[in-house]
């Protein structure tokens, strides 16, 4: 059947094979898969329409990537050339010397062994705190971010709805959980205590900016095969680590000096600006490039491995299976100069707070900020591709780092305003009115509110009765307001 509103985009277990990563012998999963599909389909369809309002249900599967056996074989044949180290054999000093300072990507083993997040789990759902069985049992009723709408508001889904979608999705590039506030919300904050950053990354200079000032920096990441992050550079010149707890991720990394037009070709790709489309259309050309710098470093990350991405490196990430991961961005000392220049330019309030803390806790770095401010622009240098060149959505983004639903060429999602839920938590003095009527007289109204006001005006103007009623109510309110003001004035007199 056709689904003009996208409500029928998710197949039921009777229509499609359940992903083999799903613990179908887990009682909680059996119950989830046995429930009627209509309710799940409505939620998924609504989320899709919010994130991609101009995409029809058929568009989600137009490229037929899910059934493309040739593409699947091509992806499985990509070589794993990533260098690897083990935390039990390489000290932090050696890591900084050999990988962080030279800005070389590397795969790290042994960093997640002590985490409560633990192993992926078996067919019965037994496993670590982040196994699919435990996630469903502990957080099935909690909402997670799966994308953003055109006004940059977060789109949320209950995890049980998303897991049902994940188990059977045949979309070309499925929805992707890429949630940056999971450790702050009361219902999911325990996830933030289930892991600890590897000791290689303990020295994150952004910690001096404080939790409120620093940009989003950690993400809970969950997605099925073919989901992922379109090729991008992480914002502000930050580095990143991505620890995988279940499944496999396919990575392509290119150094900062590779031009944007090489990694992000302007012609529209078959399948859109999605990670899977990049791997299907762009990667084969780069792999055969005559310039060796244009040939990506490829690696296959498996459960228990952590990928380190130095600042400025292009990366495109594709999930080969159902994956569960956590990723964080950081500012290491070796990248301070390039990160500081970007922070001063794009986040002046954060740079001021950071400078104040550095003056107390890191006087040498504070002196370096003074020196950088005195340099003329042509001497400040920097990477050839700044964070502004990133098209990540995830990603985010979301991500990245592996950056989630970051495929659309919007401005960097990680540096955007708070989501709806974040705004609700903000103090009243920090919240801006979201009322379209109030926004009509607010000189500082944002673009999103202005669009809402315009839509409301067009709606009521098209309905004469409603428009007349609104005018009458406005007149009554104005009369009541003037009467009250007159009464107050007489009382005080």
Image: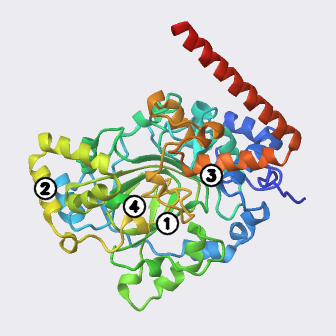
Q: Is residue 108 visible?
A: no
**Residue 149's mark?**
3
Between discs 4 and 1, the one toward the N terminus: 4
Q: Which residue is tagged 4?
A: 234
Between discs 2 and 1, the one toward the N terminus: 2
SS under mark 2: helix
Name the spot of residue 113 as percent of width and height, x first.
37, 44
Which of pointers 3 and 2 indicates the residue nearer the eye?
Answer: 2
Please say if the residues under marks 2 and 1 sit with CB atoms less than 8 Å apart: no
Q: CA distance from mark 2 to mark 1?
A: 32 Å
Please tell me which residue lies in front, 382 or 398.
382
Which of pointers 4 and 2 indicates the residue nearer the eye?
Answer: 2
Which of pointers 3 and 4 indicates the residue nearer the eye?
Answer: 3
Q: Residue at x 12, y 39 (%)?
A: 360
Between discs 3 and 2, the one toward the N terminus: 3
Please say if the residues under marks 3 and 4 sit with CB atoms less than 8 Å apart: no
Name the spot of residue 478 as percent of width and height, x first.
69, 27
**Residue 391's mark?**
1
Q: CA distance from mark 4 to mark 2?
A: 25 Å
């Amino acid at each position: 059947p056709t689904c003009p509103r996208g409500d029928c985009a998710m197949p039921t277990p009777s229509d499609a094979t359940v992903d083999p990563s799903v613990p179908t012998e887990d009682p909680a999963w059996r119950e989830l898969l046995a429930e009627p599909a209509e309710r799940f389909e409505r939620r998924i369809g609504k989320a899709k329409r919010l994130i991609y309002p101009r995409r029809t249900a058929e568009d989600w599967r137009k490229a037929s990537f899910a059934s493309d056996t040739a593409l699947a074989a091509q992806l499985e044949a990509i070589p794993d050339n990533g260098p690897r180290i083990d935390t039990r054999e390489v000290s932090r000093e050696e890591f900084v010397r050999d990988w962080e300072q030279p800005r070389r990507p590397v795969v790290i083993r042994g960093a997640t062994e002590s985490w409560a997040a633990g192993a992926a789990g078996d067919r019965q759902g037994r496993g670590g705190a982040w196994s699919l069985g435990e996630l469903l049992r502990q957080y099935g009723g909690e909402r997670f971010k799966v994308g953003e709408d055109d006004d940059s508001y977060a789109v949320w889904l209950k995890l049980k709805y998303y897991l049902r979608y994940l188990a059977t999705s045949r979309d070309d590039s499925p929805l992707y959980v890429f949630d940056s506030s999971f450790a702050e919300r009361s219902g999911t904050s325990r996830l933030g205590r289930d892991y600890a950053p590897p000791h290689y990354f303990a020295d994150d200079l952004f910690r001096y900016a404080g939790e409120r000032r620093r940009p989003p920096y950690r993400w809970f990441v969950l997605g099925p095969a073919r989901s992922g992050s379109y090729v991008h550079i992480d914002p502000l010149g930050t580095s990143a680590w991505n620890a995988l707890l279940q499944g496999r991720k396919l990575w392509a990394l290119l150094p900062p000096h590779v031009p944007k037009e090489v990694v992000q070709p302007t012609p529209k790709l078959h399948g859109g600006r999605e990670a899977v489309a990049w791997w299907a259309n762009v990667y084969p050309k780069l792999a055969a490039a005559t310039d060796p710098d244009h040939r990506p470093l490829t690696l296959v990350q498996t459960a228990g491995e952590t990928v380190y991405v130095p600042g400025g490196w292009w990366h495109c990430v594709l999930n080969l299976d159902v994956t569960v991961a956590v990723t964080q961005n950081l500012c290491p000392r070796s990248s301070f100069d390039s990160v500081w220049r970007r922070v001063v330019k794009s986040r002046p309030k954060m740079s001021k707070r950071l400078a104040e803390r550095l003056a107390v806790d890191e006087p040498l770095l504070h002196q370096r900020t003074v020196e950088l401010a005195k340099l003329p622009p042509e001497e400040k240098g920097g990477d050839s591709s700044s964070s502004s060149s990133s098209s990540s959505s995830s990603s985010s983004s979301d991500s990245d780092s592996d950056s989630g639903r970051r495929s659309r060429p919007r401005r960097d999602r990680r540096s955007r305003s708070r989501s709806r839920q974040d705004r609700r938590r903000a103090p009243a003095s920090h919240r801006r009115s979201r009322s379209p009527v109030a926004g009509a007289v607010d000189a500082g109204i944002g673009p999103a509110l202005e669009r809402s006001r315009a839509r409301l005006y067009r709606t009521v103007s098209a309905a004469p009765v409603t428009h007349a009623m609104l005018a009458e109510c406005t007149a009554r309110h104005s009369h009541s307001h003037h009467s009250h003001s007159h009464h107050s004035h007489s009382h005080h007199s």
